[in-house]
């Protein structure tokens, strides 16, 4: 039976080995990266378009720190346009999430304030996603559009041929995602990222005009954004090493006082908690009246929880922790920029070993006495 199935690995299944490096300080490396075909950001971290972490204030703050926040779509079109305007005015950049159902109306209402659109769908390998992309690319709007979610080589290659400007990639690894449990659909992140990297590499090669150039121009390719599964700085490092340009995160920002809107705060026994939930959770379906059929036939692929509000940690603290980990890894590996590091696991510029089940214990601080 083994010959019918390929082994798939997650971030925790490998450890990276250092390369010879002439980098003497973390300050020497450049963490800027492509977020879409025509846009770059200074750090490869994106706040997910989840309503419990994607607030106006969190998007503005993240934009100013050099990453970016994505304004979620679970609000009226007028509210989204008003919030997009505030984010654009205060940080000079705005990414707006849209769904298929009312994409045209939302684009018309928000286009003057939006730099990039995020098409927010569960399965990018779908006819309605391809139909949307064909229509959008001939509509006259100039904003880049990131589509998803993708998982396979086929999905990425097909949408690249339809001029997608980036991919929200992976299905299932998010901390509040139940898709793998409910449907059996998914793939461990490291292998999933390889599928996207390989698809884009082959697509790039297919676009080369050998009369004019002998290799692809990286500036012309769409981006790969790993969606979910990022818990520690090491996961960010391995996402880049396995072919991604940046990561989309929710859980690492959940519960931060400078992220939460008042409506997502709950007080229990004089203690304050923040809501945190997947956008396919029952809470979201009920709050936004998104029933597909009847309430008795409710099917969800997301979970929800409460997180104690973290008063002594900010978005900056999280960003600095993750970017310093990335910078340190780049110095160990000998890369001065992310473009050279990206996909190094697959082009043999980064070496790795496969971990045993016991290695995780060894890899964390384990000398503390509780």
Image (tube, helix red, strand yellow):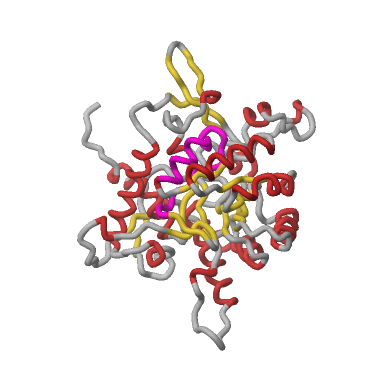
Query: Which percent across, then down, holds residue 230?
Result: 44, 45
The answer to whether residue 263 is above or below residue 269 is: below
232 over 192 or under it: above or below: above
Asked whether 68 falls inside the magenta stretch, the response is no
**Rendered residue at 66%/54% (across/down):** 124
Residue 332 appears in the rendering = no
User: Given the current orientation, which residue lies at the most extreme top position?
Assistant: 269
Please, is residue 333 above or below residue 111 in the view? below
Q: Is residue 236 among what the camera can see?
A: yes
Image quadrant where one finds the N terminus: bottom right
Residue drawn at x 59%, y 49% is 114
Nearest the eye: 343 or 164: 164
332 and 48: which one is in front?
48
Q: Can you name the residue that lies furthest to the bottom here?
A: 211
Question: At x 59% / y 61%, what residue is drawn?
Answer: 165
Asked which quadrant contains residue 25, the reply is bottom left
Asked whether residue 51 is drawn in magenta, I would say: yes
State the extent of the magenta-drawn residues as a range.
Answer: 42-64
Q: Quarter of the image holding residue 184?
A: top right
In this view, the residue farthest toward the right is 293
Find residue 298 and report its horizontal and vertical position in percent.
Answer: 72, 31
- Residue at 63% over, 47% down: 120
Q: Is residue 244 left or right of residue 85?
A: left
Image coordinates of residue 121 in percent, x first then y, are 66, 47
């Amino acid at each position: 039976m083994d010959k019918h199935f390929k082994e798939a690995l997650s971030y925790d299944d490998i450890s990276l080995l250092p390369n010879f490096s002439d980098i003497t300080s973390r300050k020497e490396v450049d963490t800027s990266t492509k977020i879409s075909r025509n846009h770059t950001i200074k750090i490869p971290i994106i706040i997910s378009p989840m309503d419990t972490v994607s607030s106006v204030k969190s998007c503005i703050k993240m934009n100013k720190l050099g990453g970016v926040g994505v304004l979620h779509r679970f609000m009226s079109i007028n509210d989204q346009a008003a919030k997009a305007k505030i984010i654009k005015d205060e940080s000079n950049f705005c990414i707006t999430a849209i769904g298929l159902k009312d994409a045209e109306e939302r684009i018309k209402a928000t286009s003057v304030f939006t730099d990039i659109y995020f098409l927010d769908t569960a399965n990018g390998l779908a006819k309605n996603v391809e139909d949307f992309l064909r229509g959008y690319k001939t509509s006259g709007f100039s904003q880049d559009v990131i589509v998803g979610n993708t998982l396979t080589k086929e999905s990425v290659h097909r949408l690249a041929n339809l001029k997608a400007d980036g991919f929200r990639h992976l299905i299932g690894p998010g901390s509040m995602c139940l898709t793998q449990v409910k449907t059996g659909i998914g793939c461990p992140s490291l292998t999933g990222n390889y599928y996207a990297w390989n698809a884009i590499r082959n697509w790039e090669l297919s676009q080369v005009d050998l009369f004019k150039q002998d290799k692809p121009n990286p500036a012309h390719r769409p981006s790969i954004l790993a969606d979910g599964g990022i818990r520690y700085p090491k996961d960010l490092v391995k996402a880049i090493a396995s072919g991604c340009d940046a990561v989309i995160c929710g859980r690492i920002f959940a519960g931060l006082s400078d992220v939460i809107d008042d409506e997502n705060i709950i007080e229990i026994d004089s203690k304050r908690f923040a809501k945190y939930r997947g956008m396919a959770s029952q809470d979201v379906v009920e709050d936004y009246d998104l029933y597909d059929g009847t309430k008795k036939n409710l099917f969800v692929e997301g979970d929800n929880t409460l997180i104690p509000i973290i008063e002594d940690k900010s978005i900056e603290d999280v960003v600095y922790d993750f970017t310093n980990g990335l910078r340190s890894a780049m110095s160990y590996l000998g890369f001065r920029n992310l473009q050279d590091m990206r996909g190094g696991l697959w082009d043999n510029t980064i070496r790795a070993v496969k971990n045993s089940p016991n290695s995780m214990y060894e890899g964390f601080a384990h000398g503390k006495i509780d």
